[in-house]
Structures are given as C-alpha cells and as structure tokens.
Image: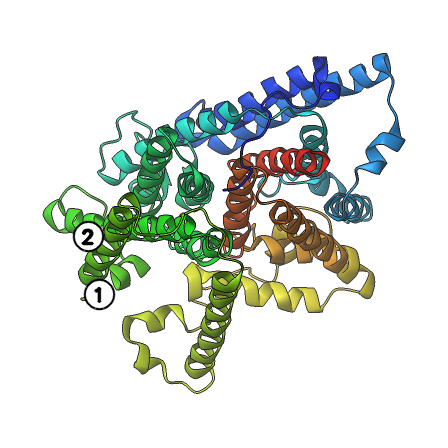
Amino acid sequence: MKGWKMAENGSGEKNSFLSKILGIYVLLIGLGFPIVFRNRYFDMLSTKYFFYWICTLLLIVLSFAYFIFKGFSVKDIVKKMTVADYSILIFLLVAAISTFTSSYLYESFWGNEGRYTGLFLLSLYVLSYFLVSRFWIYRSFYIDGMLLVGMFVCLFGITDYFQMDIFRFRVDVVVEQKNIFTSTIGNINTYTAYVGMVMAMSSVLFSVSNGKKKFYYYFCMVISFFAIIMGVSDNAYISLAALFGFLPLYLFSNKNGIRRYLVVLATFLSVVKIISWINVYFKDIVLGIDSVFNIIADSGALLYLIVGLWGLAGLWYVLKHKSCLESETRECGKRFQYMWLILIALMVLLVIYVLYDCNVSGNIQRYGSLGNYLIFNDEWGTHRGYIWRNAMERFSEFSPWKKLVGYGPETFKMLLMHKTYNNPYNETFDAAHNEYLQFLLTTGIIGLVSYVTFLLSYIKRCFSCRNKNPYMIAMAFAVTCYSTQALVNLNVPTVTPFFWLLLGMSSALSMESVVN
C-alpha cells in the first residue's frame, strides 16, 4: 500500500526511559500473556488475571514515578485527546459511579463474583491504553513476535483437535468438560476470540506486504484459519464474517489488493475443504465439528468455487508478470469499495428478511439445517437466548438512575441470581455472553454508549490514516474481529488484555501517522 513504510525509531520525545519500560510491557503482555499458565486449566483465569494486573500495575507505578521525577504536563496530554479518548474516560467515570453507588460495592470493584472484570481491572485497561498509546515506540518486530507466539497457541489448539494433549493440559479434567478447553487460553470461545485477532492481523499483513515477509504472514494466516475452525466454536464464524466482510473496504482501492483478497478467500475455503476431508478420514481421532462449518463444507459448489478462485488468482498473477496488465498498485479510486458497501447493505437486508421470515412468519422449514441458527428462542446459542431475554427483563425493572449508570461492573450474577434460580438448564449465569448487554446492565446506557463510541471512533481514526502503516490497520482489524465476536462472547482476562494492548498500540501508530 502507498506510503506503508514508517520510521521504526519513533519520535525523539518518546525515546526515553518510559518508552523502554513500555517496550518491555508490550513484550510481556503481547508475547508472554497468551502462553502464561500455572496449573493448566484449573486456574487459567486467575493466573492470567494476576499476571496481567501485576505487570500493568507495575507499569503504572513506574510511569507515575517517572512523571514525578521528570515533570508532567496535563496540557500536553489534553492536546492529543481524541473522541475515542474522551469516550473511554466517560466510560471509566460511569463505571466508577456505578461501583460506588452499587449495592455490591466490593464485588463491583474486584469482580470476584464474575470473571474479575470489576472497576479495578477496567481501570487498568484504560490507564494502560493511555500509556501505550502515548509513550510506546513502534517497532514491527513486536507485531511479528505476537504472531509467532500466536502460532504456538494455534498449533497447540490444532493438536487438541486431534486429541493429542501433548502438554497434558487435559489430564484430570472431567470427561464432560475436556472438549470445551483448548491450548493455553482455556475456554474454546475465548480461544477463538484470541485466534480471531491473530487471524485478522496475519491476513491483513499478508494482503499488503511484499518481499519475503509475505510468506511468513501467509503461513500465520493459514495456521490461524485451521486453528479458528478447529476451535469448534460457532463464535469463530462471526470473526470470519467480520474479516471477509470488511477487508475489501481496505483492499479494494487497487488491483493488487483485489487479487490478494481472492488469494485469502481461496486459502480459507481450501482450509475448510481440507478440514472436511480430515473429519472423514481421521474421524476416529479428531473431535469433529457439528456447527455452521458443516453447512459450508457440505456445499456441493465449494470445490468448484475453490478451483475457480485459485484459477482466477493464478491467471491474474501470470498476466501481471507478463506485463499484460496496468500497474497493480495503481489506485482504482473508491468505486469497488462503494460497490462492496452496496453488497454488504443488500446482505444485511437479506438477513433481516430471513430472520423475519423465520421468527415472525414461521417459515423455518425453507432454510433446512440453517434454520436452527435463525430462530431466536431460549435455546438459541447454547441458552444465550434465555440469558438475554432474562437480562433485558431485569433491565426493564431498573430505576431511571440505574438504567443510566447500571449496578456496577461484573454484578451480572447477582442481578440475575434470583430471576434465573431453578432454571430449566440447571446452570448459573454469571455473565451475559454478550459484552455489550453485560455493559448495559452493569454500567448502564451511558456506559454502553460511551464504550461503543470509543470503539467506533478508534476504528474511524485508524482508517482515516490507513495508507500510513499496515500494522496499524492489521491491529484495527483484530480489534474489529474481537468487538464483533463480543456480541456473543465474554469479556474475560484470559484474552481481553491482549485486545486492550492492541488498542493502545494501534492508537499510538495513528497518532504518529497524524504527526508525520
């Protein structure tokens, strides 16, 4: 992409003791956090939580000590504030208000009755975001190193799909729960959230890189495609939809981007077909997949589509090297991006119609096996329908004040405890399995709106300087995939700290791009 090379040493004002501390912190969270563990899956959540907050609290203490020693100007920080920055500060303020006005003050602060995402952890997320975005110095090896660690996590997860358990993580896990934990992340839903971010970064970087590095990114992309499907979580397909749905809006500005997208899509569909063959020929040793995957893999047109995509991409490549085509990097304007936007809009309208047809008109039989995913009832999404219905009914009972600021972070369990007591599934619901619905109940309308505004403003800012640095866009896509999958997933410290690190790193690059 035009202008994608950027100075590796950052600005002179950042070249200080603090920037070195930030560099160590990025290595600890970006490379160390995904693979840290103690007692396998039995304390994975608490181990990663303690690792993160200790590293981050140490960073904050050292940073403030540095500010006191060197002097600190609030005015300089305010000058660089963006809409995203103001939004996340409002979110944190609302989280603090909801905590200190909560009937569950202790639980809201520490998050000990849920997944530890109380005010304490949220404060660490926001403070680390500001420190990284202001004082971290960009080096491409940080992101390349994250992908390398991601490959270890992915390959470990792939071996779990073959039930090899090479590191003996599943020993002593009860039989009923063995298949819902994988790799060094833990639960398959959070695992696919992490892999989705790795997949997004590697896919974007392959799509825009040249030279030998593109082979490294292609390898990472292929492995992450295998890993996210073999994670056996339907949540993965939301990340995949976000990646393939939004990637053309970035790539379709020139012919090379279009050709690379064809290669990415052909590669993914090839991986789907290979996994379907694996499931047939190695059915006795693999976990198998009973999900959306089968709808794609069993399609009679899949093989023809794969051959067609590879054929088209190959022909394009041959013609390019015979100089039969114009320069591949010549800008095409925005016409292809606008055409893709129209296609997305039509797809959204189609989905709305199909959902209406199934849930209101009752024509579920028209859609065959896909119908199970289109009917929204209590059973939908492994009982997510039940959780969401009860959560919204509980929210409707809130006072006007509580609707604005919520009952305090990570109080979902207490709010739903009595309402879902003796539920037909014999389960305890301590999370909404929808990050945005969880924030609605726990930080209220103001908290949810400010958090969503933060994400949208951040993404808009990154894409406004999209030609400056592809690593920034790669991380922005990773954030987008995580945020999309968050519609059906949890905010937990086994993977969310990595998400916040990417937010800070890519924000640092967006600010650097604006300055340059």
Which residue is at the front of the view, 305 or 59? 305
Q: Amino acid at mark 1?
A: Ser
- Report how far apart the C-alphas of labels 1 and 2 lie in the structure: 11 Å
- Residue 276 image label: 2
Q: Where is residue 11? Give x, y as percent.
A: 70, 23
Residue lying at the far left in this picture: please name it. Answer: 281
Q: Residue at x 21, y 54 (%)?
A: 311
Quadrant showing the C terminus: top right
Q: Secondary structure at mark 2?
A: helix
Q: Is residue 428 above or below residue 128?
A: below
Q: Residue at x 71, y 43 (%)?
A: 108
Which residue is at the front of the view, 336 or 10? 336
Residue 183 appears in the picture as rendered = no
Which residue is at the front of the view, 109 or 235? 235
Q: Amino acid at mark 2?
A: Ser
Residue occupied by mark 1: 299
**Which of disc 2 and disc 1 is earlier in sequence?**
2
Q: Where is residue 177? Give x, y as percent.
A: 34, 43
